Image (cartoon, rainbow, N blue to C red):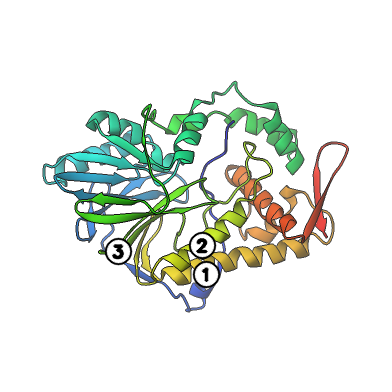
């Protein structure tokens, strides 16, 4: 079943608010060395940073090339667009010292990370490395076509409070995920939590996070004191944590909070974090604490808002500062449901369903 997978940005967070008051605990690196499209910046020994164009407020994704013996390992690939492929071709031709691509790693399934993975793997005749859940979910999502709208997905969004206009919008956009994905290879190599991957004689440990994606791969190199964080540990914005029709009773927010706490336990604090969006930074433990705190505060606001029964589409003010537009309505709904499910599991809220199948949430 289709999952709406675009990255959605929460506008507020504890760390962001501290930053506005002059108390930002993060230290940003390489701010004056942003690579142009089709160019690279070296951010650690043998680790190259490139930026691929996107649309919208997040107008780029950071991708990485790591020196790998007699070639290079790519981590994340950008959207399947001609301008992104042109950027890659420029990098291949001008910035890799004449050495080949040896493999492609995708941190998780979303199209800005996997969009060109299949294309590069075919062009360079190399393997794709991913977590199992994300590889197969990406394949399933990319296979959905516009005519495949499942009735239980309509029921899911009607339960959240969608009117017929919103439901028709969902029907119209259904099946678009595959357009941003170059077809993935038939097979892949699995990455598991705790696995050590040898890249160019250095060990990179896979640390798996949950909540934003089923099995989000972060790559930690103890020797370089670097972690490639993908969307799991962004510096200034919170990654979308959503419930979707494919798993309507899930509690991904619990998984995300637990992942942040676990990362804080197993990773040292003095790492250079290479995120998928925005600035490179130091202050990993502070950021993990900030991400946890933001969601805990959001759950408290949600509880207060539900003193009178509310639908999922009514609770946006507890989670987001900015106005929710048409383009962000679906992921905002998914994130609202994620917070509602987490609050329900904590026995903060209970839910009743009316005779039209709409869920109404209220304080327990």
Q: Is residue 282 above or below residue 230?
A: below
| Number of numbered discs overlaid on the protein picture | 3
Q: Which residue is mark 1?
A: 289
Name the N-terminal-most of marks 1 and 2. 2
Q: Secondary structure at mark 2?
A: helix
How many residues crowd mark 3 within 10 Å: few (<14), some (14–19), many (20+)? some
How many residues crowd mark 2 within 10 Å: few (<14), some (14–19), many (20+)? many
Name the N-terminal-most of marks 2 and 3. 3
The extreme right residue here reads 355
The extreme left residue here reads 98
Eye-nearest disc, 2 or 3: 3
Q: CA distance from mark 2 to mark 3?
A: 19 Å
x%, y% of residue 62? 35, 51
Q: CA distance from mark 1 to mark 3?
A: 21 Å
Name the foreground residue: 235 vs 200.
200
Eye-nearest disc, 1 or 3: 3
x%, y% of residue 317? 69, 58
Q: Is residue 342 above or below residue 24?
A: above
x%, y% of residue 236? 47, 63
Does the residue at mark 1 contact the one at mark 2 (Cβ under 8 Å)? yes
Name the quarter where the C terminus is drawn: bottom right
Q: Which residue is mark 2?
A: 260
Q: Which residue is mark 3?
A: 222
Q: Is residue 30 left or right of residue 238?
A: left
Residue 257 in view here: yes
How many residues crowd mark 1 within 10 Å: few (<14), some (14–19), many (20+)? some
Label number found at residue 335: none
Name the foreground residue: 86 vs 155.
155
Q: Secondary structure at mark 3?
A: loop
Q: Is residue 179 above or below residue 309?
A: above
Q: Is residue 189 left or right of residue 136?
A: left
Name the N-terminal-most of marks 1 and 3. 3
């Amino acid at each position: 079943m289709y999952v709406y997978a675009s990255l959605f940005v929460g506008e507020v967070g504890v760390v962001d608010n501290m930053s506005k008051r002059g108390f930002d605990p993060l230290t940003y690196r390489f701010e004056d060395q942003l690579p142009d499209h089709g160019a690279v910046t070296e951010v650690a020994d043998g680790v190259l940073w490139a930026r691929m164009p996107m649309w919208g407020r997040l107008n780029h994704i950071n991708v990485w090339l790591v020196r790998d013996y007699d070639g290079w390992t790519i981590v994340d690939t950008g959207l399947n667009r001609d301008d992104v492929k042109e950027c890659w071709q420029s990098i291949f031709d001008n910035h890799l010292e004449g050495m080949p691509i040896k493999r492609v790693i995708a941190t998780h399934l979303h199209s800005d990370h996997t969009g060109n993975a299949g294309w590069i793997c075919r062009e360079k005749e190399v393997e794709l490395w991913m977590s199992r859940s994300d590889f197969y979910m990406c394949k399933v999502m990319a296979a959905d076509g516009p005519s495949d709208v499942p009735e239980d997905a309509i029921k899911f969004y009607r339960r959240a409070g969608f009117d017929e206009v919103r439901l028709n919008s969902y029907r119209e956009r259904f099946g678009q995920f595959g357009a941003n994905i170059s077809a993935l290879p038939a097979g892949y190599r699995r990455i598991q939590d705790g696995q050590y991957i040898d890249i160019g004689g250095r060990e990179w440990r896979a640390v798996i996070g949950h909540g934003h994606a089923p099995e989000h791969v972060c790559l930690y190199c103890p020797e370089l004191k670097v972690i490639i964080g993908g969307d799991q540990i962004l510096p200034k914005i919170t990654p979308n944590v959503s419930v979707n029709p494919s798993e309507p009773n899930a509690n991904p927010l619990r998984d995300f909070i637990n992942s942040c706490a676990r990362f804080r336990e197993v990773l040292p604090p003095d790492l250079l974090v290479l995120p998928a969006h925005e600035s490179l930074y130091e202050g990993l433990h502070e950021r993990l604490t900030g991400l946890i705190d933001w969601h805990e505060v959001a759950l408290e606001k949600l509880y207060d808002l539900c003193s009178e029964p509310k639908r999922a589409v009514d609770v946006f003010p507890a989670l987001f500062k900015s106005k929710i537009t048409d383009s962000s309505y679906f992921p905002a709904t998914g994130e609202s449901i994620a917070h509602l499910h987490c609050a329900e599991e904590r026995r903060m809220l209970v839910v009743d369903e009316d005779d039209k199948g709409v869920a109404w949430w209220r304080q327990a």
